[in-house]
Amino acid sequence: MSRKPLRVLTPRSILPALAVMLVLAAGAAAHANKPVPFGDRVAGPGDAEATPVNSESLSAADLDLRVGPGLEAFHRQTGDQAWSYRREGAEALYLAMAGDNAIVVWDDGIVTSVRPGDHAVRWHRAVPGLADWLRGDGEPGADKRTDAQRKQLAKQRAAAALHTVQRDGSPWLALVTPNLTMGLRDADGDLRYNDKPANGCAYDPLRAVHTDYAVLIPRSCTNGGGQAVSGGITGYRLDSNGWAMSTGPAATVKVLDRSRVEITDGPIVPPKVFDTKAAAPETACGALDAPFAAVRPLGGCVDPSAPPAADAPAAPAPTAPVTPAATGAPAAPDTSATSDTPVGTGAPAATDAPAAPAGDQPAAQQP
């Protein structure tokens, strides 16, 4: 029986194993020193270091949420700070609620969903082009803005970029920039749609509005010479298809209630009411297609040929004037002359009192 001699490890054979160990050690060190994703930091009140907060479970109704420099939460009853959520190198500009969750827009173009009850970060989304539009660099007059004006502009645009739709059971949100609109499901931050305007057109986030069912985004368009031409309004929803309508270059949209908006398209075209839940315009009373309208005016339409309502109060019957004969009092003769009777002719004076019934007259005396 033969035995293999012991293998002597030479420097050349040790190198591969040593290289593997060095790579593993470097990877472990990098993992240990890896920065927190997106620079997330959660701190308790007065904590110098960013450490998770072990506090009682709270709801959004218990907290007053504010932005700047991060998302700051305060107890409504006492005013004391509950926790602070911040991101390194970024500043929170705007906050909106999607159901019970807080949606924050940051100046670096990141959008974050936070659950206020346990200050847990639910998801992050980066919006292409959002940070550039918030800063407004390269725009006419941008170099003359002060720091305060730049910050105010960024906050105004952040508020215009974020629209939360409080649809029952499943809130969602839209993010709007001049060159892109995105729809995200709040439950997990899943991207449900993204859309770009047609060539020569741009979305106008400052004119965009939302209801409890849809987000309506106007767009403006120009021709090759830079002149404004007809634009449009696009409606976006998650539960069904959206829609688009052509308008003038400066149409405005005003929210009326949870589902209806009023679209004004210049001084010539009358305003139009659109129902975002039914995805149809409101049909005016008296129109030819009113009997088949998908959306009727809120007050309804009255049919002119319909009989009056049965419970309407009846008009009071006219009352006859009370005459002296009816009361039994003697009638006073009218001694004033009429215009047809000469004065002093001995003609009998006319009277305005009605004659008494024949049965009430006294019998004529016999000679």
Image (spheres, rainbow, N blue to C red):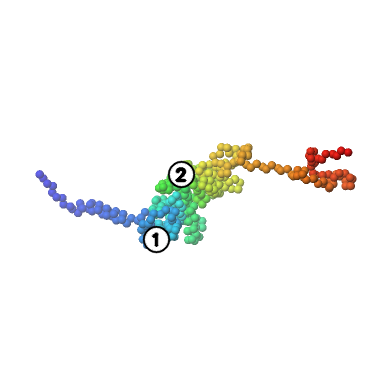
Q: x%, y% of residue 233?
A: 52, 46
Residue 217 is labelled as none
**Quadrant of residue 49 within the rendered picture:** bottom left
- Under mark 2, the amino acid is Leu
Q: Residue at x 58, y 46 (%)?
A: 271
- Quickly name the residue at label 2: 238
Residue type indicated by callout 1:
Pro
Of helix, strand and loop, which one carries label 2?
A: loop
Side of 7 where 127 appears, left or right: right
Where, quadrant-wise, is the N terminus in this rendering?
top left
Q: Identify the residue under disc 1.
A: 45
Name the quarter where the C terminus is drawn. Answer: top right
Q: Earlier in the sequence, mark 2 or mark 1?
A: 1
Q: Position of residue 284 (x, y in %)?
A: 59, 42
How far is mark 2 from mark 1, CA to CA?
39 Å
Q: Would you say residue 82 is visible in this rendering? A: yes
Q: x, y (%) of residue 190? A: 41, 46
In the picture provided, is 69 more to the left or to the right than 299? Answer: left
Q: Residues within 10 Å of mark 1 (few under 14, many from 20)?
A: some
- Give how far across and how far down residue 104 sits, in percent: 44, 53
In this view, the residue in front, 136 or 317, is 317
Q: How many marks?
A: 2
Left or right: residue 312 compared with residue 23:
right
Question: Along the horizontal axis of the image, is 282 left or right of 110?
Answer: right
Q: Nearer the viewer, residue 11 or 51?
A: 51
